[in-house]
Image (cartoon, rainbow, N blue to C red):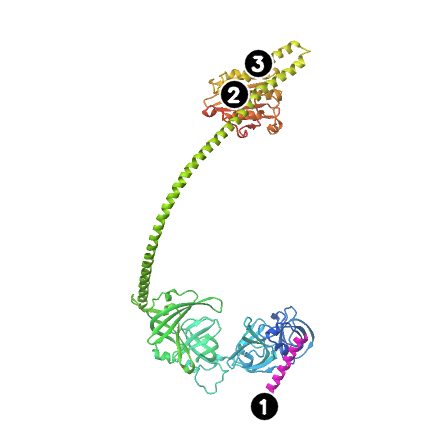
Amino acid sequence: MRESFKLLLYFAFTLLNAGQVVSAQETNAVLTNASAVLALSAEHASLGIKVSIRGVVTAAEPDWGGRFFIQDSSGGVFVENISHRQPAPGDVLIVSGISFPGGYAPTISKPDWGKVGEAPLPRPKPVAIEDLMSGAEDGQRVKFSGIVRHAEKSGNLLEAELTSGGYRVVAYGPMLPGIDPEKLVGAQVDLAGTPATAYNGTLRHLLSVDVYFPCVTDFSIVKVAASDPFQEPLTPINNIAQYRAGRSFVDRVHIKGVLTYQRNGEDLFIKDASGGLQIKSREALSLSKGDVVEAVGFPEFENFLPVLDDAVFRKAAEPRANVESVSPPVGELLEGLHHSDFITVRGKLLDHLEERSTSPTGEPDIKTILELQSSNLVLTAEAETPAPDQPLLSIPIGSLVEVSGICFLQSAAGGRIQSVQILIPTTYSVRVLKKPSWLTLQRLFIFLVIAFVVIIAGTTWTIMVTKRNSALKRLIHERELDQKELQEAHDTLEWRVTERTEQLKFEVTARKEAEVQFKATLTERTRLARELHDTIEQTMTGITLQLNTINKLFEQDPKVATHHLGLIRNMVRRSRVDLRRTIWDLRSRELEQFNLCGALSIGANQIAENAGIRVEVETRGSIRPLPEVVEDTLLRISQEAITNTVKHSSASCVKLDLDFSDQNIVLEIKDNGNGFTPDNCAGPSEGHFGILGMSERAKRVDGRVSITSQPRQGTVVRVVLPITPANLPKAINEPADQTEIIADPNPYC
């Protein structure tokens, strides 16, 4: 009747909260108690409904980043407060915020809170361990009882693991003054605190429940543990699961045995005269096989088989013992007589495989599994190593092997053994007794499969070849027809190409002839311009100079003026000769032969005499006739150089040095005049073509002209002409890039 009344009240309270939630959503009102927030579904909580509650802080750890649990008269709720500001347990707060789905249960987010006082923590609600572990009491201050199975200092907090009714809860709170955490193991305690769930946020699934108690008084020791459990009487390993009068589930047992296998920080296996046992312990004390070990722990059952859990152990003073394995028959294994014992079995290797995982410490963990058949029993042998165990993986399938290790049984309800597993301590615990014959069933099957594949492939290949041959014959016939048509088209195309080629040859020949004529005309025009410049223009320049002289001397000294008139007549006569020769060049390509040395002397004196410049001509080498074009080039360049000397240098001496060598003719014209700066020399853009003309004449016969000069240090014009068949005249189509102008600090004269 009382339980029915409680259910009725809970149903009415739930309807009242649901009505408050609906009203808050419809009227934009505010949720004013914790139970109304917890009653929200995840969808409703995500709407951000306004919340304003008044309550007492029940849990708030310094490393929570400002988060805390608050509880009012209706229940407790978690507050998502990301801030450096954090209340303390016992503070009375007014919290305003919005609803949030949370990772497991609805919470209050974006809070704005203020402290209005302090109050005692709410009276804890007694709960059964089953209700606590279901997550239904999340955030509510509760009270329950349990046995301490493990305790240690975690930072500034006491971390204690409690068990009750087959469940395990981790509690966090302040350190108990004057009490060593290890002394709490085995004690029966009453604990009051606020449970907080660990969850999978994606699935919103409960994983575990932790309890936070803020006060030392919340952790009450009902029954203390034994001061030194190693002083308790020894219990044979085979007796820990047997009936004992007055036995309590909080009592620990004290056992002793020889170590057979250890997985440090996880478990170890020992045996005595009565049998073997698995001991689960977190201690990291490393032992060796054969060490005598004492252990104290809580007897429990896993898969209906005994195990010593939450144990502490130590190495006994006895010397190391020799560990002998037993070779039990299959029937005894199936009866569960050798669980956790060190045994040796023989069997045929059926298969081996490798599993990779990560150990709790983060190190790689590779498990090599051998599947064996011993009589009518199929069992597995497993070895855990940080790297692949190649010796085990290299054992041929079908070998007869002998395995020594820890027998680990899996049992079902009623004690029926489901599987047998052997934990291999080292690779040397497996010994190959007999390797399989070469022709195994597996290899025979492989050979049959290969033969079948070859037959299928051969048949398929034959069919494909036949089809391809037929298709190839059709293609050959079609290609023969296409080839005949292609040959006809090719003959027609070849005739048209030949006809078109003849037309193109005619057009190209005509175009080339036109280009040759154009280049010849352009070359002749360029040559004629040089001839006019080097002959008539220079003669006219000389006549002009003589007329200027006559103009100055006519009144002062008529005889000298008359002499200059005679020079003018000679220059006009010479100009007529040059003009006739030019006309003759236009009519015929052959030039008349003349003495180069005499021509250079006569030409230089005619130009320099009236300017008061002394002319010296020196010849070296074997004097011989030269090609007409070479002699003409040297003569014209010398005339241009001496004319420039008369016009610009104010020199008193000019020397012509003509050198006949086997390969080259070198002509140097040196003066002792003012000189000039080559970089500032006037060129064609200012109407001066003298240097350009000299360069073009030299280039026409594969020669080069270099000019060396500095201010007030004279000028040297050097002409180098090779005597080769290439001296034939050629068109000047490029700029005169072979003229070299150099500043020389030591010129002649």
Residue 578 sits in quarter: top right
Majority secondary structure of magenta residues: helix
Tell me if mark 3 has few (under 14), some (14-19) or many (20+) residues whose alpha carbon lies within 10 angstroms of its own.
few
> Please, which residue is most extreme toward the bottom here?
1
Nearer to the camera, 563 or 188: 563
Tell me if mark 1 has few (under 14), some (14-19) or many (20+) residues whose alpha carbon lies within 10 angstroms of its own.
few
Give the residues drawn in magenta, as a range: 1-29
Circle 2 — which element? Answer: helix
Q: Are marks 1 and 3 in contact (CB under 8 Å)?
A: no
* Residue 40 position within the rendered picture, expressed as x and y whole percent measured from the top left: 61, 76
Circle 3 — which element? Answer: helix
Mark 1 or mark 3, earlier in chain: 1
Q: Which residue is mark 1?
A: 1
| Residue 66 seen in this snapshot | yes
Nearer to the camera, 459 or 409: 459
Mark 1 or mark 2, earlier in chain: 1
Amino acid type at circle 3 is: Arg
* Quadrant (top left/top right/bottom left/bottom right) for the C terminus: top right
Amino acid type at circle 2 is: Leu
Indicate yes or no whether the magenta region holds residue 671. Answer: no
Q: Which residue is mark 2?
A: 586
Indicate yes or no whether the magenta region holds residue 22. Answer: yes
Q: Which residue is mark 3?
A: 573
* Quadrant (top left/top right/bottom left/bottom right) for the N terminus: bottom right
